[in-house]
Image: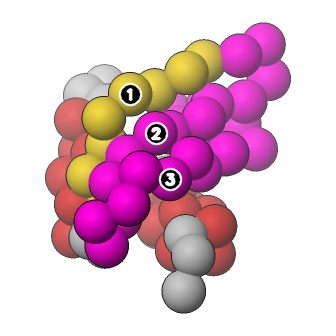
Amino acid sequence: MKLSRYSREALKLGFKVLDIYRYKDKEVLRGIYRGKVVLVELPRYRESMDLETFKNELRSKLPS
């Protein structure tokens, strides 16, 4: 499974992924959103989510 498709979906939401930090039970994405560096904590690994769930999680965690 290619994880780059998650980065492409994030880019469609305006979030450019810079780094991905993997922990025992979660992932933290560091990226640029609206000109600022933000951290987004995902409750589980990207590969355990389908793309729609990933987009919804990312959208809900991004600052408005």
- Give yes or no for contact between labels 3 and 2 (Cβ–Cβ under 8 Å): yes
Q: Which mark is residue 34?
A: none
Q: Is residue 10 above or below residue 1?
A: below
SS at badge 3 = strand
Is residue 57 rendered to the left or right of residue 15?
right
Q: Nearer the viewer, residue 29 or 47?
A: 29
Measured Cα–Cα span from mark 1 to mark 2: 5 Å
Q: Residue at x 57, y 76 (%)?
A: 63
**In the rendered structure, which disc, 1 or 2, sits on the residue that comes first in sequence?**
1
According to the picture, the residue beneath numbered tag 2 turns out to be: 30
Q: Residues within 10 Å of mark 2 (few under 14, many from 20)?
A: some
SS at badge 2 = strand
Q: Quadrant of residue 56?
A: bottom right
Q: Residue at x 56, y 47 (%)?
A: 39
Is residue 49 rendered to the left or right of residue 23?
left
Residue 56 visible in the current orientation:
no
Measured Cα–Cα span from mark 3 to mark 2: 6 Å
Q: Nearer the viewer, residue 44 or 36?
A: 36
According to the picture, the residue beneath numbered tag 3 turns out to be: 38
SS at badge 1 = strand
Residue 11 is a magenta residue: no
